[in-house]
Structures are given as C-alpha cells and as structure tokens.
Image (spheres, rainbow, N blue to C red):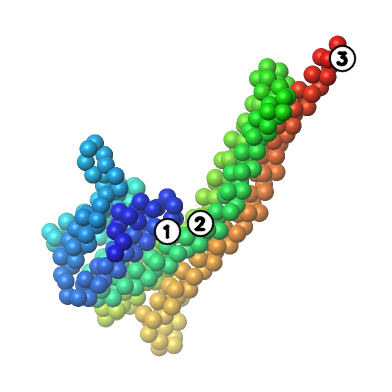
C-alpha cells in the first residue's frame, strides 16, 4: 500500500498526488470500518502505518513531518479522545497551510456521517470516489498543460540565447547592451517585457489549472445524510451547516434545490438522484478543466506576441544590428 509520505513526495511532479493521498486514507478508513474496527482504532492504525512508512526528509537531525501527516495525527488523536475528528482536521489544516486542500472535504463528509448516523464505511467509499475523480482531473489538466507550458518556457529563453549567439559569432552584442545608450534602453525595455511575459504566462497557467476538490460535494453530503434515514429537512440543515463550516465555497444550494424538487414531483429516491447529479457535476468540472487547459495553448500567444517577441527584437536583433552598423561606420572612418 502506498504510504502518505510517498504520495506527498511526488506532489510536485504529480498534480493529483495531494488529493490522491487523502483518497487513499479515506479508502483505508472505509475498509477498516467495514471490517468492524472502531473509528478511533481505524484512525490510529492508518496514522501509525503512514508514520512507520517513512518521512519526507530530515530537519534539525530529526524526521521532517509534512502538513498532511500532522493533520492525520491530529485526527487520530481526536478520535482516540472521543473528540470531533472534523474539528481537529479543520484546526490542524489551518495551522499547516502545506496540507492537502482535500482535507476539508474529508472533514465535511465525516462530520455529516457522524452527526446523521449514516454508515461511515459506505459514506467514506463514496467520498473516495469523489476524491479519485478530482485527482484524475488534476492529472489530466497537468498533462494538457505540459506542452504549452514547455513551449512558453522555451520561447521566453530565446532572447537571452540570441544575445549569447550573437556574441559567439563575433558581434559585440553584450557591449552594445551595456555600453551604448540605445543598447541600454533596449536592455531595460527588453528585460521588462520578458518579466511581464513570464508573469503573464504563469498567471495563465495557474488560471487554467485551477480545479476544486469539492465539486458536487454538497450533493454528495446530502446523499450521505439521507442514507441514515433522516428526513430531507433535517439532512439539508445538517449539510448546510457542515458546508458553511468546512467548505463554504462548495456550492450555493441551487443544485440541491433542483434535485430535491424533482424527487418530490416524481416520487423518486432523493439519494440516488443526488449522487447522479454529483457525478454529473464532477464530470462537467473535468470537461471544463480539460477545455481550459486546451485553450491555454492559444492564450499563450498573447504574451508571446505582445511581450516575448518584442523582447527578442530588443535584446537579440537590435543589438546585433547596432553592432553591425557601428562596426561598419568605425571601419569607414
């Protein structure tokens, strides 16, 4: 079984590793609970397993502990003391910003299941599916962004490469940029354009890679609450309070209203409709993320045309031409 620390270690290379780590914890808890292990013992076993599997490195001569490990340890401690696991996750997550953003999702699901009396194992299995979908979405978006991002980095590196190339061919491009008034102006303006273009590229990439681990979560939480046999009204109050506490930006309640109204009109099972709508929302989020990543290749043309190419002319072509002209005039005189 893959340890939490190993997943955290790969987070920089795998954009879905952080969410996948929490999905793995959720699945382990579900299996242990389904086997009849008490919740306090299940958290302790999962925490001990990850603690014994290794650490992310060493700090001050001791083992370095990641934010996810600290949140996991806090949840296990709260469970062993009979305290609120969801509250412990929220406090520890706020104290360790490096922890996965999927922790509040697990906290919300645990709180709803515990408060409503819903079967914890089944609820956690459903949540694990939600988190696996989000992890796969982040991987898909990361793969789609890899090509455009690499192209942007390569094009941004062209102006400095041109300066070095011109100097290698015997042109005094460096001297022009540093010793000629026009060259200095080209250097300053070109550097500013490169800086602006690089920042623009990063901002576009961040926007295209934004995704939410809580897509469709409000629907899923209501389905969990209703699986306990609670009434629609009680389940909605509990879900609304939990969402407001742990994941306040996960939804505005309109999707829930539509599904509940449809179930009331048709006499259909509300929980099944809620899970179906949650799945649709997650798939729509995946499609939107893939579309945003695909559109990035076109949007990167803007900083390329408005910043990088002018910088290429100012830092590469202009010094070369100035060097040729000054050299020719010097020879003529």
- Residue 5 visible in rendering: yes
Mark 3 closeness class: few <14, some 14–19, many ≥20 residues within 10 Å? few
Q: Which residue is mark 1?
A: 16
Which residue does the image show at 70% across and 39% down from the upper left?
309
> Going by the picture, which residue comes out furthest to the front?
169
How far across and down, in percent of the image, does residue 90 sit? 28, 54
- Residue 189 visible in rendering: no
Q: In the depicted view, which residue is nearer to us: 104 or 172?
A: 172
Q: CB atoms at circles 3 and 1 under 8 Å apart?
A: no
> Left or right of 47: which side holds 310?
right
Residue 121 found in image quarter: bottom left
Which residue does the image show at 42% across and 80% down from the upper left?
273
Nearer the viewer's eye, disc 3 or disc 1?
A: 3
Q: CB atoms at circles 2 and 3 under 8 Å apart?
A: no
| Secondary element at tag 1 | loop
Q: Is residue 46 above or below residue 184?
A: below
Q: Which residue is mark 3?
A: 332
Q: Which residue is mark 2?
A: 142
Which of the two labelled residues, at mark 3 and mark 1, occupies the earlier sequence position? 1
Q: In the depicted view, which residue is nearer to us: 294 or 220?
A: 294
| Inter-mark Cα distance, 2 to 3 | 57 Å
How far across and down, in percent of the image, does residue 242 sit? 31, 63
| Secondary element at tag 3 | helix
């Amino acid at each position: 079984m893959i340890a939490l620390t190993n997943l955290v270690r790969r987070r920089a290379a795998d954009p879905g590793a952080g969410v996948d780590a929490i999905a793995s914890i959720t699945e382990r808890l579900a299996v242990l609970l389904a086997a009849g292990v008490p919740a306090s013992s299940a958290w302790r076993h999962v925490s001990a397993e990850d603690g014994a599997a290794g650490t992310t490195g060493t700090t001050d001569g001791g083992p370095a502990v990641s934010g996810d490990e600290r949140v996991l340890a806090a949840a296990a401690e709260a469970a062993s003391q009979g305290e609120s696991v969801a509250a412990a996750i929220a406090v520890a997550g706020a104290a360790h910003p490096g922890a996965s953003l999927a922790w509040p999702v697990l906290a919300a699901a645990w709180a709803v299941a515990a408060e409503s009396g819903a079967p914890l194992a089944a609820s956690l299995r459903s949540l694990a599916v939600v988190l696996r979908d989000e992890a796969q979405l982040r991987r898909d978006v990361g793969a789609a962004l890899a090509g455009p991002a690499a192209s942007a980095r390569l094009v941004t590196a062209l102006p400095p490469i041109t300066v070095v190339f011109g100097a290698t061919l015997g042109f005094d491009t460096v001297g022009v940029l540093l010793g000629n008034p026009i060259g200095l102006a080209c250097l300053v303006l070109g550097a500013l354009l490169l800086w602006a273009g690089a920042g623009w590229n990063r901002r576009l990439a961040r926007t295209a890679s934004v995704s939410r681990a809580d897509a469709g979560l409000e629907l899923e939480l209501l389905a969990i609450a209703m699986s306990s046999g609670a009434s629609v009204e009680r389940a909605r109050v509990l879900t609304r309070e939990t969402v407001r506490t742990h994941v306040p930006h996960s939804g505005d309640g309109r999707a829930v209203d539509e599904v509940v109204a449809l179930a009331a009109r048709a006499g259909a099972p509300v929980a099944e409709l809620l899970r179906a709508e949650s799945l649709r929302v997650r798939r729509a989020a995946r499609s939107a993320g893939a579309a945003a990543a695909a559109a990035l290749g076109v949007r990167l043309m803007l900083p390329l045309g408005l910043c990088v190419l002018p910088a290429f002319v100012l830092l590469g072509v202009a010094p070369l031409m100035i060097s040729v002209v000054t050299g020719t005039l010097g020879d003529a005189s």
